[in-house]
Each structure stands twice: as C-alpha cells, then as structure tokens.
Image (spheres, rainbow, N blue to C red):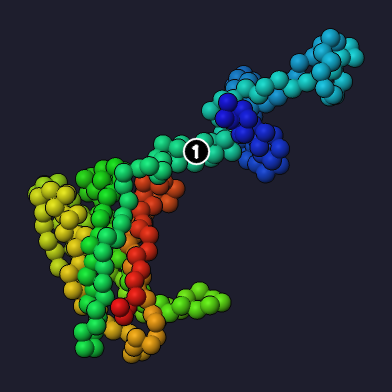
Amino acid sequence: MFWRSIGIPIYYRYGERLLGNIGGLHGHHRASNGPDLNKGLLQLGVRQKMRVGAGLSRGTGRRGLNGGMAFPEDPVIAPSCHYPLAWILGFLFLVNGLSPAIGADFGFRVLQARLTQQSDALALSANIDYRFSPAAVDALRHGVPLTVAVTARILQPRHWFWDEVLWRKRLDFRLQYYPLAQSYQVVDEGNRVQRSFVTLKAALEALGVLQEVPLKAPRRKLTPKDEVYVSLGVKLDIEKLPWALRPLAYLSPQWRLASSEYQWPLFD
C-alpha cells in the first residue's frame, strides 16, 4: 500500500520526465537481445496496460476501440531497473524504518563536566555515558574502530547574533576491538596513550571519564566580568569510519550518535 499510494504517483508524475534517459538506455539494451527477450522483459517492466471496452464509463480518458473509453490499470511492479525511483525510496525507507531512533536504548550523554583554570592552562573533567547502538557494537566486534570526538567551547552570549566562540578544543578517542587478543583498546589520539580492557563495559566506563585533562588556555584572558559559559558535546565521528560504511552511517539513526550540549558558566 505504501508504494501504491506514494511511490507510483511520484513515478508517473515525475519519473518519466526525470528518468526518461535512463529508461531509453535500458530499452536500447533490451532491443539488442532479440525480440523474444524484449517481449518478456517488457511484460515484467513497469508499464500501463489499457483496458478497452464499450461498457467502461468511469472518469475521462482517451477513446478506445469501438468508441469505448480506455483507462490505465494498476501498473505491474517488478524488480527491474526501469523503476529506479522506487528502489531509491525503498532503500531510504528500509534503512530508516528498520533502525528507529525514537525510544531506542542507545546514545551519548554528558552527565557532569567542569573546566577549571590552572595558571596559564585549563583542565577539563567530565563524566560521559556512552551507549553505542547494536549496529555500532556489531561493527566494533568485527574490527571496525570507532572514534568519538569530545568538543569543549567557551562562548560569549550576544543578543542579535549567534553566541561568539572564544575558544574551542576537540579531543578524539578511538575505541577498537582485537579479536585475536579478545581485548578492547581505548586510545587517546591527542597524546597516544593506550589502555586495554577485557570487556566492552569496562572500556566504555574508562572512555567516559575525563580527569583533569590539560588544555591550552585561550589567547584572551577571561575574567568574571566577561560572563562567558562553557559548552561540552560528544559525538561519533562518522568521517573516521571506513569509507564503504559511511553512506549507511549518514542515513541510519543507529550511527548518528551525538549528545546534547552540556553548558555551565565558566565562573561560578
């Protein structure tokens, strides 16, 4: 019913106009395979069959034989390349329909965070809850490394424009599983510190704890009079996935993993 009510009208209204060249190419290909094969493929393709009869009187249409009215029947839908729009829409519907994000028990969340000033540097501490989706966990256990990006920003509010970003720092952490060693490894990409864990739960707990991570201070010296605030967010970096997996990751909610921004004033 979905394609009969949505896909078919879209095809007949726009498909022939937009994809006529593609259909012509396939028609030329069929013509080169002999008349018998052409006839069989045309019967399997998407086409309109006209029902002719003198007794048909519903609606308006072109004149048929014996003065009757000719009306299109429902098209015959077959898995052929003559109907590419339905295949594209079906793929998008399948990817997003089978992976619902609403009510799912996965996602990232910043539980607590603080940014303190230490002489000429800053120190970031945070607790982050990482809950990877089943698709991400399955890929991880098959050797696909997952990179999460933790981004901290200092912003100054503005009335008529977006808040001004005074300082930004990104921290990348890679989570990887080694089947031969049966261990999970958490790698701090900034300083190349590696830690190994036996279970995924232990690895995620360690990944979610940031303890006094030193960061370079902003060039501009900030004071309580500036009334600035800090924003911290974390997301799965899709660009760090293998290139063959990225198209699916951009479409599926199971791969679009990101937390909401956790914000607090820099000077309490």
Using the image, determine if residue 133 lies above or below residue 125.
above
Q: Position of residue 158 (x, y in %)?
A: 50, 79
Using the image, determine if residue 43 lies above or below residue 82.
above
Q: Amino acid at mark 1?
A: Phe
Q: Which residue is mark 1?
A: 93
Q: Quadrant of the N terminus?
A: top right
Residue placed most toward the observer, 120 or 2? 120
- Quarter of the image for residue 20 reads top right
Q: Give the structural element (helix, strand or loop) at label 1.
A: helix
- Left or right: residue 69 versus residue 132 is right
Rendered residue at 62%/22% (across/down)? 76
- Quarter of the image for residue 222 reads bottom left
Rendered residue at 81%/18% (across/down)? 58
- Quarter of the image for residue 196 reads bottom left
Q: Position of residue 149 (x, y in %)?
A: 31, 64
Visible residue check, residue 183: no
- Left or right: residue 12 versus residue 255 is right
Judged from this view, the residue extending furthest toward the top is 55
Judged from this view, the residue extending furthest toward the right is 67
Q: Position of residue 117 (x, y in %)?
A: 24, 83
Q: Position of residue 150 (x, y in %)?
A: 30, 66
Report the number of discs: 1
- Left or right: residue 41 versus residue 222 is right
Using the image, determine if residue 190 lies above or below residue 33.
below
Visible residue check, residue 86: yes
- Left or right: residue 139 versus residue 182 is right
Rendered residue at 23%/62% (across/down)? 127
